């Protein structure tokens, strides 16, 4: 981040530090940014930049090419994570030098992805929580970006896998509440920083999966239905195979008619092939086999 550009603009406008931070932050916060390179929250930095006619992107222009490439790389890894290509995600994240991440949004995306990836492959909790704390305690201290909600998802996933039911429920209740508010006014949601439908679907899917795992099948299915509807409306197909898998699993556990279950399993396979999601193809075959044999589905997760 080109902090010198910020300072130069402020001084050229003859704005003192006291006047600059009035109504936005403390002088100490501004001084730490200008002299020590400690970047304040996104909300504060946006307001400070606006006061002198700049944007956060203006401060990142010197690194625009590399920043654009890093964004493309991280966006690609985010899609691969949805497709459960975990080895590809791990390799991609390990190839990124954290020091190159000058943009706060890129930093949050990186730590969110690495933290969620860690939760999904059962990395030590302290490593997962370290990545999440970078967002909650530093980059998004005021908890106003979508990445805070995604951290709650990752925390819920981690605690559910650790069989710490109360903690998992705490985080997924927060996420579910956020989802309900979003669905009341999607336009309000898309005024938030870093929002897109893939991230909203990430929250919907993992919350639906959590409810299935604890036997709250109706709550799970309601979210699945909304997720499928959203995939159709906004042409975001990455989650369809996994959402359809959850629908089939819910139907089996709700003892739906065989015709309904067979149709859903066929849909899982069809969408898995369309999206080249071999992981779900294998899981769907296992789901079908266990269903036919009347075996437990408890350890089958989408």
Image: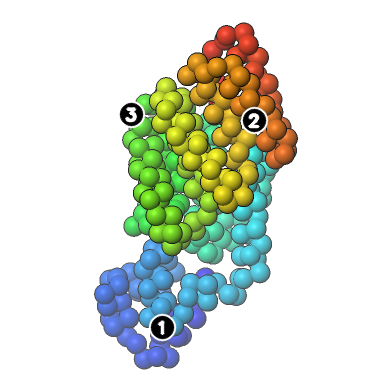
Circle nearer the viewer, 2 or 1: 2
The quarter of the picture where residue 302 lies is top right
- Say the numbered circle drawn on residue 52: 1
Q: Residues within 10 Å of mark 2 (few under 14, many from 20)?
A: many
In the depicted structure, whether residue 263 falls above or below residue 296 = below
- Say the numbered circle drawn on residue 268: 2
Residue wearing tag 3 = 166
Seen at 41% across and 48% down, the residue is: 183
Quick one: 78 or 272, which is closer to the camera? 272
* Residue 282: percent from left, percent from top: 69, 25
Q: Are marks 3 and 1 in contact (CB under 8 Å)?
A: no
In the depicted structure, whether residue 124 falls above or below residue 283 = below
Seen at 63% across and 43% down, the residue is: 238
Task: Give the CA distance from mark 3 to mark 1.
Answer: 47 Å
Tell me which numbered mark, 3 or 1, is placed earlier along the sequence: 1
Task: Give the CA distance from mark 2 to mark 1.
Answer: 53 Å
């Amino acid at each position: 981040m080109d902090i010198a550009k910020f300072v130069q603009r402020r001084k050229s406008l003859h704005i003192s530090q006291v006047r600059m931070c009035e109504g936005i932050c403390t002088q100490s916060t501004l001084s730490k940014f200008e002299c020590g390179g400690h970047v304040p929250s996104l909300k504060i930095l946006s307001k400070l930049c606006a006061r002198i006619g700049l944007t956060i992107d203006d401060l990142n222009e010197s690194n625009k090419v590399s920043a654009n490439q890093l964004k493309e790389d991280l966006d690609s890894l985010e899609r691969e994570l949805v497709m459960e290509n975990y080895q590809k995600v791990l390799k991609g994240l390990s190839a990124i030098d954290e020091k190159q991440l000058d943009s706060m949004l890129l930093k949050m995306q990186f730590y969110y992805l690495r933290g969620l990836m860690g939760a999904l492959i059962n990395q030590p909790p302290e490593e997962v929580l370290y990545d999440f704390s970078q967002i909650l305690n530093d980059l998004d201290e005021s908890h106003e970006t979508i990445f805070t909600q995604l951290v709650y998802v990752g925390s819920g996933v981690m605690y559910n896998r650790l069989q710490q039911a109360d903690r998992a429920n705490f985080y997924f209740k927060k996420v579910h509440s956020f989802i309900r508010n979003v669905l009341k006014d999607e336009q309000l949601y898309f005024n938030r920083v870093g929002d897109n439908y893939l991230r909203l679907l990430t929250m919907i899917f993992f919350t639906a999966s959590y409810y299935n795992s604890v036997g709250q099948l109706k709550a799970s299915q309601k979210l699945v239905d909304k997720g499928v509807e959203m995939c159709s409306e906004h042409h975001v197909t990455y989650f369809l195979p996994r959402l359809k898998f959850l629908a089939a699993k819910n139907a089996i556990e709700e003892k739906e008619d065989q015709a309904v279950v067979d149709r859903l399993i066929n849909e899982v396979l069809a969408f898995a092939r369309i999206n080249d999601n071999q992981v779900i193809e294998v899981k769907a075959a296992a789901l079908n086999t266990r269903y036919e044999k009347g075996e437990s589905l408890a350890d089958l997760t989408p």
